[in-house]
Amino acid sequence: MVEFLNIFIGGLILGGIYALIAVGLSLQYGVARVLNISHGEFIMVGAFLTWAMYTFWGLNPLASLAIVGPAIFVVGFVLHRTLFTRLRTSSASPAAYEGGSLIATFGLMFIIQNLAIITWGTDIEAYSFLNTGVSIFGARFAANRLTMLLFAAGICVVFYLFLARTRLGKAIRAAAQDPETAGMMGVNIKRVLALCFGLGALMAGLAGSLLSMCYPIRTTMGLEYTIIAIIVVVLGGMGSIVGSFIGGLILGMVGSIVLYIDPSLSLVAYYFIFILLLLVRPTGILGK
Amino acid sequence: MRILEGEGVSKHFGGLAALSNVDFHVDAGEIVGLIGPNGAGKTTLFNLVSAALTTKQGVIKFKGRKITGLKPHQICRMGLARTFQSVKIFGNMPALTNVYIGSLFGIPAGTPSAYAAKGAEELLEFVGLSASKVTPAKDLTLVNQKRVEVARALATKPELLLLDELMAGLNPTEVAQAMELVTKIRDRGITVFVIEHVMKAIMGVCDRIIVLHHGEKIAEGTPQEIANNRAVVEVYLGE
Amino acid sequence: MLEVNNINTFYGKAQALFDLSLRVEESEIFALIGSNGAGKTTLLNTISGLVTPASGNIEFLGKRINGLAPHIIVEMGISHVPEGGRIFNEMTVRENLEMGAYSSHAWKIRWGTLQQVYEIFPVLKEREKQLARTLSGGEHQMLAMGRGLMSRPKLCILDEPSYGLAPKYVEEVFRIINSLREQGITILLIEQNVRHTLETADRACVLENGHIVLDDICDNLLQSDHVRKAYLGL
Amino acid sequence: TMVLALAAPLFAAGCDEAEPEKEVIVFGAARPLTGPFAVYEEMAFGPIYKMWVDEVNARGGLYIEEYGKRLPIELKIYDDGSDMGTMTSMLERLILEDEVDFILPPASTAFLFAAAPIANKHGYILMGAEGGGTTLTPLLPSLPYYFGVLNYSDHYQMPVLADILSDAGIETAAIMYLEDLHGVEYSGVAGIELTNAGIDIVMTKSVPLGVMDVSSIINQAKTLGAEAFLSFCYPDENFLAIGTAIALDYNPDVFLTGPGANFAFFAGVFGPAAEGIMGYGAWNTKSSAASEDFYEKFIALYDPGLLDWWGHNLYYAGLQFFEQAIEEAGTLDQAVIREVMATSTFDTILGPTWFDMTADGEGGGLLAEECYTGQVGQWQNGVFEVVDPGANRTAPPVIPKPAWPAEE
Amino acid sequence: MNSVASIVLNRSFQLGLLAVILIALATLPLHYQGYNIVRLLNIFMFVVLTVSWVIFSGSTGYMSLASAAFFGVGIYTSALLGDKLPIAVVVGIGALVSSCVAFLVGALTLRLRGIYFAIFTFGLVELIKHLTLWWEINMEDRRGRLVVYVENDIIFWVMLSILVATLLTAYFIRRSKWGLALQSIGENEEAAAHMGINVTLVKVITFAVSALFVGASGAIIATRWTYIDPGIAFNPLYSFMPVLMAIFGGMGRLLGPVIGAIAFTYLKEELGTEFPELYMLIFGIILIVAILYMPNGLVGLIQRLWIRGFRRQDADT
Ligand SMILES: Nc1ncnc2c1ncn2[C@@H]1O[C@H](COP(=O)(O)OP(=O)(O)OP(=O)(O)O)[C@@H](O)[C@H]1O
Ligand SMILES: Nc1ncnc2c1ncn2[C@@H]1O[C@H](COP(=O)(O)OP(=O)(O)OP(=O)(O)O)[C@@H](O)[C@H]1O
Ligand SMILES: [Mg+2]
Ligand SMILES: [Mg+2]
């Protein structure tokens, strides 16, 4: 029973992280059509801001979510309004835009990382926060990881409700399917796309904040997280927020089980499951 | 001679029976119409015949040979060509290249490419597009894109041609021209199987009409018989 | 109500509309006729802001609208039902309709409008929760029109609403257009079903190669030799 | 137009320039300024070679008899982006195109392995810094220009650890190692040495780079009741292991992580929880007066959090040795300097320092065992004490380690 | 038209110039031993990777991120066999093994489309990497291996031959019926199938052919790297780089990827050595500016300038 809980809740925690990392990217690619290679850099910046505020000002990492999120949102929004909007209007076709924006985000990745290296150096940073055990029916878990899971789940649910229920959320979904027609319905497409990009960045920033509570951070860590995010998003089905969530949980559970059996196989298992699932469902779990 | 025949053809999408147990046939030299309300399964039938979709239920034979289970390119090389309801052209290629590809690959290997190129030009003229040879296909109007598709299909030297809603969006005068085109295709010795919603055209060119409704065949006969069939009037024609 | 003055529209270097002018009066059905590629869709797209004219002037209710973004034009009361309907396949019927009422003034009163739309198209109420992509062709077109109405337009632009529809639904479409007019909505219509259109509309103009060649009340056009020959196939 | 594209690089093939009068000595290196290994540049060899160059230049440079004057040192550092292909190319560029006088090593064991044959081929002395390993030992005879300074698994660390553990009466140990040359070597050697010392290895688990959860391993070690937990991973995984052990309340008598525990900032992150954790190294200000001086110099220049209590004094000593060998040789001829390095003993912050050469002095060498200030360290009251048995010891090991502190 | 231009555009002139350059390149190591050999062979390698990528992905629109897998397979072939067989044979085996892997992968996955295919192939690289790692550690109790040493000029010649083979293949595929089939698959695969094109066969074979060159260049470059392990051999960088270089150069014509790879490799190295602390920043800015102002890549820009140059000349005369 305890072992089962260890694996199960461990899987939830990992899955929660994966989902949180992926949801923002899913939004950016699914709606704004930008496969954001610099996604991980936003995670990294979120993590470093949180770390810096904790170390230098003693600010509670959970409280810093409220600062990091909006700050990174603004950056994402402005980036889209300037760079990507320009790119979109000057691109000959949607495919050309996707290719172009891929390159542009590569560029962004280099720029953000270099700026971060100038600011924070390349060494490892870490802090200890809520690092105590919490017992759930006899199984013990680190409090910071549970907190991260709770916040990740909360953020994802709020975000899902926002998309499903609100006027803006519906506009975002409509824009994801057919931006031009959404424009004809009265949606300010430029703003909605920028909003999506900004929200994606915001989710990345929050993910970074939460991750920094549990893992050491480095300014060069971004790409690793981008890769995880892309994998989860594709696994879930492009543009499906719920899919990303499910994809994250599946990978998390698989990871947790394999870590229990043989940790050295965990990454082999991730990629194996990923490849297998794609072969069975060529457009992801919830793709159409 | 039956150039195309199907027995007990069925297709399900999840729980939805898009086609159930349809028997049909097309004789060589005929123009056969396929009509039915939206969503009746007409395009699905074409997709099965041309192997764009596969099914395990039922048998489809072309020129007496079973073709279920074959790949689209094999069916094309046997002499069966088609156009698409939602056009599928090679958008960034000039109209002429679209047709040229048809003549290059649809015919037996070893044909000199100069011959194929000539055939392509001739066909483009046949569908009335010789003026737009070099225009990238995506810049043509929808109707002209459909004509490119017809020329491209003809370029593969088919014996049977499937036309899916060639006449949608045409005004009556243009419909008349399109009808003429269909007749001319038949006059080249090509059997034609058409889906249309434009009654005037269907009634005008077809020798025989098959009516589908909810994936089932509800009527079959000459245009006259179909126009007077009560079930057809009720579910399809209206009034 | 809508006044188009001397607009010229280009796709890249190719000119699609030449010095084109027309007027649509309040509460009428105004039809555009023309062979394929004549520029009808281009004209509608220019009016609703999807394409920007290179020169000329478009006024709606006395205000200049060319150069404005589509979402602002919708707010001003023009609703465009595009070629093929272009409904949001992955959203439910209800959500599609709500999207139609996205513009701020329509959003506040969307529940009322929704009931009205359901009255016009009772089928849509039955299918409320269904994903739009599972609708039949006719229902699909009804949804597109219903969505157009949700923005409470003063002017409704319909681009070939009967495209690809079975004959039975084509009748239905014209019935709906008539009932819209009865509710006082002005209609700008493109249809290939020329006879039916000219019998339904008040006035119409004939577009050829980006030029307007005829502009008259429909009864006259039905008598015109040119129209009879080129568009009615007589 | 195809032609033009192919022609372009040809123009780049420049012609030789006449050699100017020698004014500076150029030291070149391909270092990971970016990418996953960039952390080495900031926390390991990076600060040391910069500090050393500044010091030498402050003295006016290296005195080279051949030129009859002091020549200042200039650094030429290229970024290898943590990519092997780039590193090997950059190294050859430094040697062939820039014709630097000396090279400094790239970072990480694998990169050292790749760099050693290249340096050797061109007859450049390569002092090894971050990395080294048992796999290199059999190759040493064929690499006369290689001089490794860092201690590694069978290069005295594991035998010493085994002694410490058996002295303390530890009977069982659990090993977690990274799927990486470092992890594989350490776990392999630990298996041999600990078993020889009569310690039962109850668990050996490997984890992939980038692992995000090690609770199952910690849980298992806890269930098996392993008295010693040895984590042969990099800081990322080691931090995770410690954090998880604290949360899961697994407090073995010995908790060793390396590399990781040897960095000064480690104690900052874990605070009181760092108490009693062991790592490799080691040196501290008590090791010798020279160590104390070195420490003072370092913190005058850098954030004390960047200190490495394992490698820093070794890298610095290596450079001091290199520097004296060059001056002693009185020329920039690498072959001559190599002979001096292979046969001499110089004073460095480690005291008298020399290399144990292979193949009767014809092969490459490793820093002699006697020169090290310590092999195993342990955090005690905020100091990384050397706990080796013998003369190097600065404090006796605390085994069992204190309990994890309660979170306040 | 202007006479200089007409000479430059003359076919036999171009071929002649090409031959001269080729001979100049081939004989370079005979009288020169410096770093430019290394620089050139690195450039060649990236041109090979990029052009191979374009052979398949450029026309079909299937964005493959599997290059690193084929490259790594080549590298490992070299590491395992390099000391047992002559280097030319090793390179050949590397090419064939990569090609076989590509064939299998292609047969399995080419029904995936768009981003799914791209990320699948990426996942594949990682899977192979971690499997190799697992196998080395658990079955052989080691990690990484040394690769046989080969002289730089030999590497140079082998790489040059691979380059020539790649360019010739790309050129002839582009001009053939086969190339048209690939292009039509990129435009609309379903329609292509209905035109009588055996799309599966065309895709899988092209994929396998393009992997030949990637594998070969991996096998030869490994000897320069001297020491490799799975992380080094299967580095996703070598999947991303060809894509970036191809887009950077422009994919409209064969020349685009070639120029893109040359310019990119050169730029990256020069920036990395001139401004090691800031080059990522500069590089990032260049990428963004390039994509904003050169929508058709470098060749697009060159073409534009070229045409403008002609206009001016024409106006002058
Ligand atoms: N790939 C598919 N997946 C799921 N359902 C499908 C698919 N293709 C068709 N359908 C469904 O099958 C039914 C028949 O579709 P089909 O396209 O054959 O109709 P049709 O008779 O051609 O209609 P129309 O006249 O509107 O073109 C429809 O309900 C349609 O929604
Ligand atoms: N996106 C585009 N790019 C380039 N040319 C275009 C584009 N859209 C339309 N055109 C051209 O503009 C002209 C007018 O097209 P438009 O779609 O307005 O015609 P239409 O009258 O609506 O025709 P149809 O009856 O086929 O709908 C045509 O020649 C068409 O080829
Ligand atoms: Mg259909
Ligand atoms: Mg139109």
Image (tube, rainbow, N blue to C red):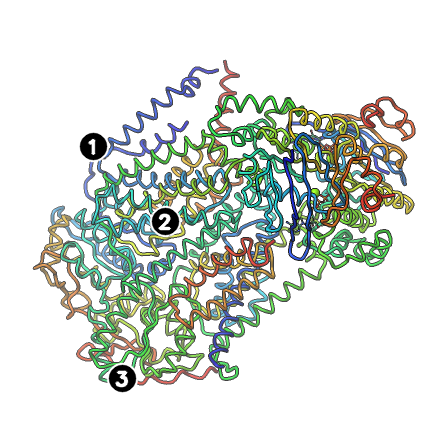
Q: Secondary structure at mark 2?
A: loop
CA gap between label 2 and label 3 equals 50 Å
Instruction: Tell me the quarter of the picture where residue D190 sits.
Output: bottom left
Q: Secondary structure at mark 3?
A: loop
Residue carrying label 3: D171
What chain letter is assigned to the residue under label 1?
E
The answer to whether residue C75 shows anywhere in this view is no
Residue A199 place in picture, x, y as percent: 60, 58
Question: Which residue is at the front of the view, A288 or D256?
Answer: A288
Among the two numbered marks 1 and 2 on one chain, the one whose residue lies closer to the N terminus: 1
Instruction: Tell me the quarter of the picture where residue D38 sits.
Output: bottom left
Decide: marks 3, 1 in contact (CB < 8 A)? no
CA gap between label 1 and label 2 equals 32 Å
Is B213 left or right of A222, judged from the image as shown? right
**A128 relative to E51, above or below:** below
Residue carrying label 2: E276
